[in-house]
Image (cartoon, grey):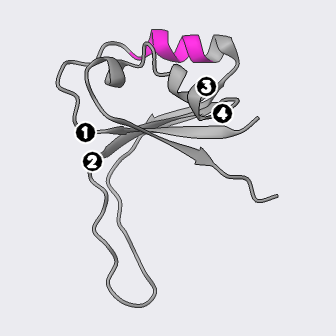
Amino acid sequence: MPEYILLMHDDASGSENDWGPYLKQLRDSGHFEGGSAIGDGACVRKIGEAAPLTVQLTSYVRVSANNLDHAKSMLVGNPHFEAGGTVEIRELLRTD
C-alpha cells in the first residue's frame, strides 16, 4: 500500500486541539506509520548556495493509503486541518 506524508504548514487560524484522539483514530485504522513535530535545521549543498529553509513546515504525519483521495479522507479530525491550517500531502515513492 502506498505511503503518504501529511505536512502541516504554520498557518492555522484557530487553536489546535489535542492530537491524541486523531492519532489514535489513525492507529486503530491501521494507517498510521509515524509522525513528529519538525524542529530547526538547515539546507545545505556541496556546491553553491542552498535555498532557504522551508520555515512554514511545522510537523508531519506518515500514513498508508490506497491513493491520494484516501489520504485526503484521513484529514477528518486532524487538529491542524480542523483549525483552518494547510496540510500538504505528498506520496512517498518507493525505490525498491
Distance between the Cα atoms at labels 1 and 3?
24 Å
Residue extending farthest to the front is: 69
Q: Horizontal placement of 92 versus 47: left or right?
A: right
Q: Nearer the viewer, mark 4 or mark 2?
A: 4
Helix or strand or loop: what does disc 2 sit on?
loop
Give me the residue at 41% from left, 17% from top.
19
- The residue wearing badge 3 is 70
Give the magenta range.
19-26
Q: Nearer the viewer, mark 1 or mark 4?
A: 4
Residue extending farthest to the left is: 13
Question: Quadrant location of the N terminus?
Answer: top right
Give me the residue at 32% from left, 54% from top.
40
Residue type at numbered disc 3: His
- The residue wearing badge 1 is 10
Residue 58's image quarter?
A: top left
Most frequent secondary structure within the magenta stretch = helix
Residue type at numbered disc 4: Asn
